[in-house]
Each structure stands twice: as structure tokens, then as C-alpha cells.
Image: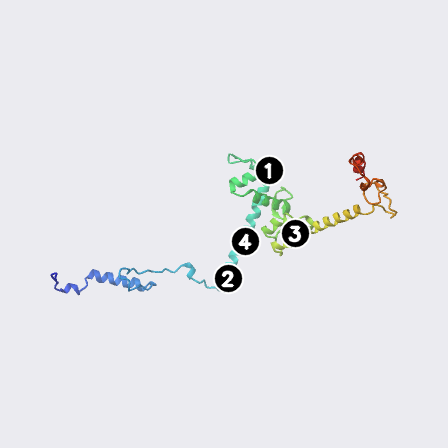
Amino acid sequence: MGKRISKAATASDFTATATDTATTTTTTASVSSAVTVPVDTDAATDTTVEYITPTVNDVVPVVTKDSIKKHLKSLDDAVKTFKKGFLSIGFNLLWFKETLAYQEIDGKEYKNIESFAKERYDISRSTALGYIQIAERFGQADPKTGEISCLKDEYKDFTPTALMVMCTLDDETLAKCKSNMRVKDIKALATAKDDDEDDSTDDSDSTKGKSSGGDGDNDGDGDNDGDGDSINSYDTRLSGVCLLHINTVEELESRKEYIFSVM
């Protein structure tokens, strides 16, 4: 049986030092000013206290008439700036394209306007050509300088995206576009135009097929009064050359040129 060792209790075991008291006070104050997560008191070794700091997602913005007015004006200004910058890019790219001034800039040579836009401004080829096309089709030239620096009056209220789509339309369809139309409605005009053209082509082909499959005459007497290109059951040139009456290959060979010429 082992020997039991005991230690006499002293006053220091029950009295906190000044340093311990200060530390305890500081810890208590900091904990009381923060949100704490309950600690599992049953865990003998885990006594760490976790603190949760509120994030911006936890803060609900206060919506007032003044805040709506403020953000709406900010958004309006940003959109106007974007539109102005969008068009300005197109107008200036068009100027560089027409003057060929892009060929050498700051000692660097560019082979075309697309490479100039891509290498200097990281604008893709398709986007650069889209900007230029808008400037060419909807821009208003200055009568004195010939430079394009603004849109024609009838296109000033269209959005840049709408103008991009409108570049693909013909003049007839373009005249139907209104500034209050959504982009998908403008696209629908182009689709409707294509469908009308397809229907017209189908009708033309159908009419052409009926005329070639008819009797080919105008007076209804069964004779071909035309140029002889139409083949029908009443074509007199085929009388006596019915394929059912050809009995041998040699006979077919002897008449094939005549048959092909008629067909």
C-alpha cells in the first residue's frame, strides 16, 4: 500500500493576486461586450470560447424614400455613363479605322483595327466590329468635319444592346423598332421577317412544281405550245417511245439520246 502524501493549505491558495484579478476583470469585460457561443461544459479539455463577429449579410439596410432616391440617381448616372462610354468607343474606333491612324501608335504597329482594339484595350474582334457597325449605321456625321460623334436623333433613346441587335435588321424591319421595345421584342421582329421570307420561298417552289407537273399548254388542247421543256403525258415527241414498248437493251441504247434530249 502506497504512502499518502498531503500538503498543508496556505492562505495563498484562497487569495488571488493583483495580476490574476486584473486579467479576470479584462476577460470578463471583453466577453460581456461580444456575442458568445455556449461552451460545452461537459468537455473536460475544450474550454475555448468562440466569438461571432456580425457580417455585412447580417445587417439589413434601412429603406427610406431618401435612400431610394439616392441609389436610383446613382444607378441612372452609371447607366448614362456606360452608354456614353459605349458609344464613344464605337465613334473613336470608326475614326481610327477610316483614317488608318491605328497603324502605328506609340511606336507600335497594328495590322488592322481589330488587332489595335484587342492588343491595346483588350476588346475582342467581334465586340470591336459591333461598336464600329453601330457608329456607321446610326451615327450622325458632323457636316463640317465629317466625323461621327453622336447618334442620329431617332436612335438616341435606344440602349446599346438594342442598337447592337438592330444592326442586323434591314431598313424595313428597322423602321418598326421603337425605343420602348425590349431587346427580345426587337429580335422577334427579325425572326418574323425571316419566317415570312421562308414562307414566300416555299410558295414560289410549290407554284413552280405545279406548273412543271401540269399539261404545259395554255389552250387546253393537250399540245405543248411552249418551248418544249415541260414534260407531260401529252408530249407528242414521246409518242411511240414509251419505255414499255422497248424490249431489248440495244433498242434502249439506240433511243436513249433522244429520250434524254426530250427529258
Question: Do callouts 3 and 2 mark residues in contact (Cβ within 8 Å)?
Answer: no
Q: What residue type is labelled 3?
A: Thr
Q: What percent of the width, then of the height, locates residue 113?
A: 57, 39
Inter-mark Cα distance, 2 to 4: 16 Å
Inter-mark Cα distance, 4 to 3: 29 Å
Q: Which of marks 4 and 3 is in front?
A: 3
Question: Do callouts 4 and 3 mark residues in contact (Cβ within 8 Å)?
Answer: no
Between 207 and 101, the one lying in front of the other is 207
Inter-mark Cα distance, 2 to 1: 47 Å
**Residue topped by disc 2:** 68
Q: Earlier in the sequence, mark 3 or mark 2?
A: 2
Disc 1 element = helix
Q: Which amino acid does label 2 sit on?
A: Ile
Q: Left or right: 124 with respect to 175?
A: left
Q: What residue type is labelled 4?
A: Val
Inter-mark Cα distance, 1 to 4: 30 Å
Determine crowd level at label 4: few under 14, some 14-19, many 20+ residues with C-alpha closer than 10 A: few
Q: Left or right: 16 with respect to 196?
A: left
Q: Earlier in the sequence, mark 1 or mark 4?
A: 4
Q: Nearer the viewer, mark 1 or mark 3?
A: 3
**Residue topped by disc 3:** 191
Looking at the image, which residue is at 22% across and 63% down? 21
Question: Do callouts 1 and 4 mark residues in contact (Cβ within 8 Å)?
Answer: no
Disc 4 element = helix
**Residue topped by disc 1:** 99
Residue 61, numbered label: none
Instruction: Please say which color scheme the image uses.
Output: rainbow
Disc 3 element = helix
Q: Earlier in the sequence, mark 4 or mark 3?
A: 4
